[in-house]
């Protein structure tokens, strides 16, 4: 199904953790591999992250049964510690991640350009599921 809507999609959550912890768990590869999947039958066996302007990142996302995998990556265009990360994905789409310090909690707002293959609601659901996994992982440790 091809989508014709190019309006950016936004997902968000409030993580019960200070912004410094949220930032670390979002950006450190040893943490990324623990939360970066949309469902329990997927995992992220590899992550590399050079969090600076013009730095690159890559996360391998794979089905646990070995049937499929792909690399999710891009180049950072804006990095403002504990506040904002913007990047361009390998296919040219843009993403913005805002971290709003709320004392003992942090609001994470992720806005991304949709791709043209899958329905908007499917994309929103997948990105929200990953963000929900991030919240759960970060609050558990």
Image (tube, rainbow, N blue to C red):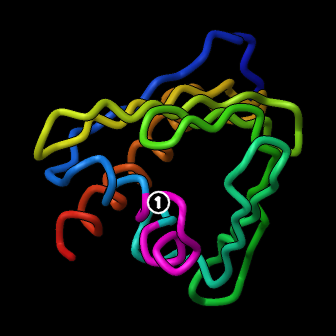
Corner quadrant of residue 123: top right
| Residue 13 picture location, percent across and down | 27, 38
Q: At 58% across and 74% down in the image, what residue appears?
A: 29
* Stretch in magenta: 24-35
**Quarter placement of the N terminus:** top right
Local crowd size for mark 1, using a 10 Å CA cut-off: few (<14), some (14–19), many (≥20): some
In the rendered image of this protein, does residue 79 appear above or below residue 6?
below
Instruction: Judge left or right: residue 87 versus residue 84.
Output: right
In the image, residue 139 above or below residue 7: below
The residue wearing badge 1 is 38
Q: Nearer the viewer, residue 68 or 100?
A: 100
Q: Position of residue 93 (x, y in %)?
A: 79, 30
120 and 25: which one is in front? 25
**What secondary structure predominates along the stretch shown in magenta?**
helix
From this viewpoint, which residue is outermost toward the bottom?
Answer: 65
Quarter of the figure with residue 88? top right
Query: Which residue is at 50% across, 65% downward?
Result: 37
């Amino acid at each position: 199904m091809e989508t014709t809507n190019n309006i950016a999609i936004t997902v968000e959550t409030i993580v019960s953790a200070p912004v410094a912890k949220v930032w670390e768990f979002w950006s450190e590869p040893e943490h990324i591999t623990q939360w970066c999947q949309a469902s329990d039958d997927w995992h992220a066996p590899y992550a590399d992250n050079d969090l600076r302007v013009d730095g690159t990142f890559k996360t391998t996302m794979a089905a646990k049964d070995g049937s499929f995998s792909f690399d999710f990556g891009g180049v950072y265009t804006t990095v403002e510690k504990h506040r904002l990360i913007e990047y361009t994905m390998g296919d040219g789409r843009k993403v913005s991640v805002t971290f709003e310090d709320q004392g003992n909690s942090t609001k994470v707002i992720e806005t991304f350009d949709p791709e043209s293959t899958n329905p908007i609601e499917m994309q929103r659901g997948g990105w929200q599921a990953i963000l929900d996994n991030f919240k759960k992982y970060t609050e558990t440790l």
